Image (cartoon, rainbow, N blue to C red):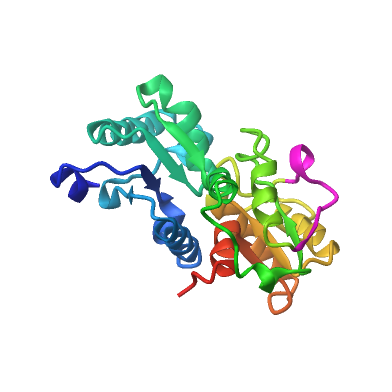
């Protein structure tokens, strides 16, 4: 972003990468896939790079309002300094925080989750999934992220994106508003699970495996991690793969490196 501003240019969108997209080795693949899609459709985008900090979502969910506001205000100062208007992110936690909680602190932006953005690109004919034959007839189930679904009411966009793959989409017994959490929300990603008979991600993975799907699709970095761990716990990692929807679209468009 700093480079563009130095040239007197502005991006169409700011891609908010998020902590997982920047630092988690597995989730970096999602960042790369989404960037390939952006470049494929010719959108002028920018990232903040080292100027992007945590949104403060984990601090707020863990009850540390002071830390949340400190992180949020730092980000808002950077975003407003660049006169950012439109932000796209693949992380529902970042999406929810910037969209719904930054405005009261002076951060007002158009914030779009990448599932909705991909749906728009498909509807506009900019992404045609020309190579989607690889997924034709393959059984795929989609896991609803809490902060995408219940918190923001986005259920259909990721499903419409997946529908372009001409795959056999199957629903888990609990889906959409009744979908089961992966167990990572509310800052639970950063701690051991509470004592109980079964970890939530195992329960959710069992529901996904019960559909017979060979691909579990996600639109959240935390969900992707928890479900991947669940699949490994069931020793199904060779038979069942967990992917973000951006990875599936990039693969169908033959954009993977």
Q: Residue 152, percent across and down?
A: 61, 33
Q: Quadrant of residue 75?
A: top left
Q: Quadrant of residue 66?
A: top left
Q: Residue 175, percent across and down?
A: 78, 45
Say which residue appears at 75% left-offset and 41% top-offset: 176
Question: Where are the magenta residues, as a range?
Answer: 167-180
Say which residue appears at 61% left-offset and 70% top-offset: 131
Question: Which of the pair 234/160 is nearer the observer?
Answer: 160
Question: Which of the pair 231/153 is nearer the observer?
Answer: 153
26 sits to left or right of 76: right
Say which residue appears at 38% left-offset and 51% top-offset: 43
Q: Is residue 38 covered in magenta?
A: no
Q: Quadrant of residue 81?
A: top left
> If the image is split into quadrants, where does the C terminus sit?
bottom left
Q: Residue 50, percent across and down?
A: 26, 51
Q: Residue furthest front?
A: 125
Question: Which of the pair 201/41 is nearer the observer?
Answer: 41
Q: Residue 71, percent across and down?
A: 35, 36
Say which residue appears at 82% left-offset and 53% top-offset: 172
């Amino acid at each position: 972003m700093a480079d563009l501003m130095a040239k007197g240019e502005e991006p169409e969108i700011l891609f908010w990468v998020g902590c997982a997209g920047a630092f988690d080795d597995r989730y970096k693949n999602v960042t790369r896939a989404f960037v390939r899609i952006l470049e494929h459709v010719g959108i002028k985008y920018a990232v903040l790079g080292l100027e992007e900090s945590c949104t403060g979502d984990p601090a707020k969910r863990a009850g540390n309002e002071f830390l949340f506001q400190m992180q949020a205000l730092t980000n808002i100062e950077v975003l407003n300094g660049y006169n950012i208007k439109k932000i796209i992110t693949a992380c529902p936690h970042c999406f929810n925080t910037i969209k719904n909680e930054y405005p009261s602190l002076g951060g007002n932006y158009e914030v779009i989750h990448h599932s909705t953005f991909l749906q728009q690109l498909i509807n506009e004919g900019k992404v045609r999934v020309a190579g989607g034959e690889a997924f034709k007839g393959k059984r795929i189930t989609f896991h609803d992220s809490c902060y995408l679904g219940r918190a923001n009411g986005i259920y259909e966009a990721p499903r419409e994106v997946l529908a372009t793959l001409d795959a056999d989409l199957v629903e888990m017994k609990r889906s959409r508003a009744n979908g089961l959490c992966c167990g990572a929300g509310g800052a639970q990603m950063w701690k051991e699970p509470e004592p109980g008979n079964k970890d939530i991600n195992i329960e959710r993975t069992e529901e996904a495996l019960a559909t017979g799907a060979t691909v579990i699709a996600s639109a959240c970095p935390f969900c992707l991690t928890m479900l991947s761990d669940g699949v490994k716990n069931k020793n199904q990692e060779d038979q069942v793969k967990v992917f973000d929807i951006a990875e599936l679209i990039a693969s169908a468009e033959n954009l993977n490196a």
